[in-house]
Amino acid sequence: MLIKTLCLGHVQTNCYIVTDEESRQCAVIDPGAEPNTVMNYLESNKLKCTHILLTHGHFDHTGAVEDVMKQTGATVYMHKKDVRRNLLEMGFRYNPPKGTQYYKEGDEVKVGPLTFKVIETPGHSEGSVCLICDGAIFTGDTLFKDSCGRTDFPGCSGADMMRSLKRLYELEGDYEIYPGHMEHTTLERERRFNVMMKSALQS
């Protein structure tokens, strides 16, 4: 499994391209902006994008979805709780393109031989998920290095965030953590040093 990080847009969102090196099939996780940058990477490396996976529906994680989908024919996946219901939710939920599939707790999405397991981790948004693939977790805006996602937007919940952080803490073993912003980390490091994660154990 090859993981490429593209830092996109004015808020520097991490978009991940996760590739099976043998088949060259890949998933694009959170294409938040700059569709040309995403497509240039796919085309220059002769990759076949079959899936676009969203950790949540905020604008900075979804801005390039439709362009990448149209150019690749990939299927979009997200959690239904982050679908936009009215204009007041613009930016905080997403109006997905036709054909979008909705995943939920325990679902598995196969990209060639790679399997992404969905775990629901609400807090930053109602429909936030983390995606586990082999030894990696793509945490979106749930877990960051030394921190966690904001909970002061519409649809956020501090109590849900604490429960989600506790759930991640209690996963067995260690994982590489690929967050929606900032640098990569490991789950074991965050168990030791992340004060928000430690607080979650006491809440």
Image: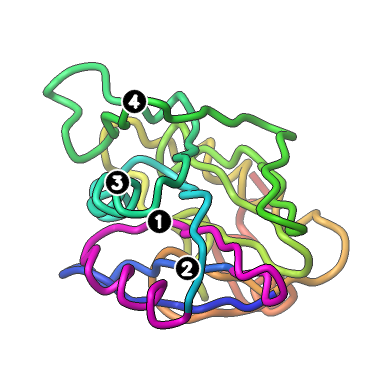
Say if the magenta span includes residue 101: no
User: Depth-wise, is mark 1 or mark 3 nearer the camera?
Assistant: 3
Q: CA distance from mark 3 to mark 4?
A: 11 Å
**Which contiguous range is marked in magenta?**
19-45
Residue 83 occupies quadrant: top left
Say if the magenta span includes residue 20: yes
- Amino acid at pointer 1: Asp
Q: Which residue is mark 3?
A: 70
Disc 4: CA contacts within 10 A as few (<14), some (14-19) or many (>=20): few
Front residue of 167 and 195: 167
User: Depth-wise, is mark 3 or mark 4 nearer the camera?
Assistant: 3
Mark toward the start of the polypeptide (2 vs 4): 2
Numbered mark located on residue 30 in the image: 1
Numbered mark located on residue 89 in the image: none
Which quarter of the rendered picture does the N terminus lie within? bottom right
Residue 192 occupies quadrant: bottom right
- Amino acid at pointer 2: Tyr
Q: Which residue is mark 4?
A: 98
Mark toward the start of the polypeptide (1 vs 4): 1
Mark toward the start of the polypeptide (1 vs 3): 1
Disc 3: CA contacts within 10 A as few (<14), some (14-19) or many (>=20): few
